[in-house]
Image (spheres, rainbow, N blue to C red):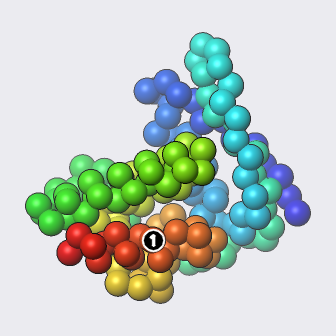
Amino acid sequence: MKVKTFQIRLDEKNLQTDQEEFNNFASSVNVKKTSTELVTGKPGYWSVLTFYTGGPVAPAAGDKISFPADTALSPEENKILTTLKQWRYDKANALQLPTYIISSNAELLAVAKTKPQSVNDLIKIRGYGGQKTAKHGEDIIAVINSVA
């Protein structure tokens, strides 16, 4: 098993890029366990210790579905995205994790746009590898079906 540490800085300048770096890495390996700790200071950051095996477990990022952050949403897609963000917040609170560990904004946007109907559809979206899909796939499909 291999170990990699990430720092997710909390300042506006770095938060998004640090989250994307972690999400890209996590979707390209088989994550076995993560451990997080909030490090206070100026600036504060989340320290994320990641235990993983292997290399890529899903298609290359270029082969997966993704959308730019400024993609326009229909009213239905916006409702799905809002509901997914609430689900992510509730799940993160229950597990005492930062929301980006559950799913990034970019991932939720792609889910809202594509509206996958099965876990097999979900795995085609950038950021959803085997482990994340196994952990949260059924919940995400249920959220989509509850809104649609």
Give the quarter of the figure containing the C terminus.
bottom left
Pointer 1: what residue?
139
Q: Is residue 67 above or below residue 64?
A: above
Q: Residue at x 34, y 65 (%)?
A: 110
Hey, which residue is sitting farthest top in the picture?
A: 42
Query: Farthest residue toward the front?
Result: 94
Q: Which kind of residue does numbered mark 1 sit on?
A: Asp
Along the line of sight, the residue nearer the viewer: 49 or 139: 139
State the image coordinates of residue 45 (x, y, percent, origin top left).
62, 28
Q: Quadrant of residue 52?
A: bottom right
Residue sitting at x 45%, y 71%:
139
Horizontally, is 78 left or right of 122 in the view?
left
Q: Nearer the viewer, residue 41 or 18?
A: 41
> Left or right: 95 with respect to 118?
right
Estimate the x, y position of residue 147 in percent, counting from the top left.
Answer: 23, 70
> Regarding mark 1 in the picture, which secondary structure is present there?
helix
Give the vertical position of 148 relative to 105 (above or below).
below
Instruction: Classify residue 28 as left or right of residue 20.
Output: right
Residue 93 rendering spot, x and y as whole percentages: 52, 45
Q: Is residue 121 above or below residue 3?
A: below
User: At which x and y percent is residue 57?
Assistant: 66, 76
